[in-house]
Amino acid sequence: MKKSDFYYELPDELIAQQPLAERSASRLLCLDKNSDGIEDRHFTDLLALLNKDDLLVLNNTKVIPARLFGHKQSGGKVEILIERVLNEREVLAHMRSSKSPKAGALIRLDAGFQCLVLGRVDDLFHLQFQGELALADILEHIGHMPLPPYIERADNINDQTRYQTVFAQKSGAVAAPTAGLHFDDAMMDKIRAKGGGIAFVTLHVASGTFRPVKVENLAEHVMHKEYFEVPQETVAAVQQTKSQGGRVIAIGTTAMRSLESASRTGELHACQGDTDLFITPGYQFKTVDAMLTNFHLPESTLLMLVSAFSGYERIKKVYQHAIAQKYRFFSYGDAMFIQRE
């Protein structure tokens, strides 16, 4: 298939610029497993779609306030977006400025903090933060939540909590696992009370998730790498679910990619490291039976993944329906529940 096969027209007004007042107030589009039947429901109806022996797998990554502002020694403005934390002092980051700073340049940040440009790693800058405070403390002081580029406003105090899942634990993401944003504590409690299982993986979502596919031939696309972990307790929970006839339900494309990356040998096993798994139609899924996901950008690797999972033509119809019914799209948008074709 070609990149252009995944293009669709989206009215700008359907791109959600703000979160809803309540996390669980989102709409939920449900696609029947064995037909093209589409139901328009509410997110809280997810509870009725779950069976007692089902297992929800969620991504517990935590978004760091990864966007920073400062000035070069010449006075020119600089915007930094951290891509990956290397240690308590050093990061790899994107940098926007009128002229790229060279190795040895000192960048003055807000509140008197500074970072030193150590060099380049491909298209990223290798930065070292100066002073006594650890990176996490610096980011807490001056970092901004890294809202995606299609949210055309500055971040605000509300984003500090709403662009973060209620179960976020492990810091390292520079974008939220957005399917998880719909869950509040009450919904989590109701799932457990119904007997549904909950397990976690970690995938630190990188800014590459928004990077456009630049080649028409998908076989030529180089997928960005992201760090992930699938712990042994999650593997055990999946195995128990399968043995009882329950479904493994990935909450979001990041949970999906984590589980499928850990299943490359054909069987799920505990592992950690970087994944560059690129899922397109024709991929044979090994672990996941159903998924909850948001609506994704045209020609994006995420749209290609859900098309591989539930069928290209079916997903195409789903998106046409969602646009006609004015669903809210992208990170702060609505969700859909789909099963493997």
Image (cartoon, rainbow, N blue to C red):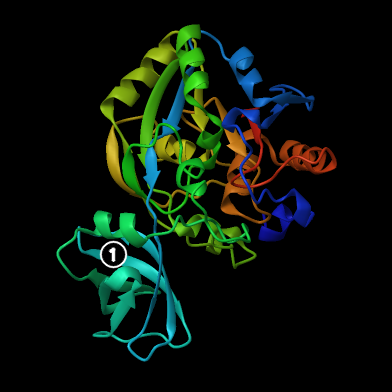
- Residue 267 seen anywhere in this rendered image of the structure: no
Quarter the C terminus occupies: top right
Identity of the residue drawn at 25% across and 55% down:
137
| Residue 83, quarter of picture | bottom left
Type of amino acid under label 1:
Val
Q: Position of residue 180 (x, y in %)?
A: 51, 34
247, 99: nearer the viewer: 99
Compared across the picture, whether 334 is left or right of 67 comes to right
Tell how many labels.
1
Compared across the picture, whether 197 is left or right of 183 comes to left
319, 183: nearer the viewer: 183
Is 189 rendered above or below residue 137? above
Quarter the N terminus occupies: bottom right
| Residue 102, quarter of picture | bottom left
| Residue 79, quarter of picture | bottom left
Identity of the residue drawn at 43% across and 14% down:
241
Q: Position of residue 121 (x, y in %)?
A: 32, 73
Identity of the residue drawn at 29% across and 23% down:
233
- Element carrying mark 1: strand
Q: How packed is label 1: few (under 14 Cα within 10 Å), some, or many (20 or more)?
A: many
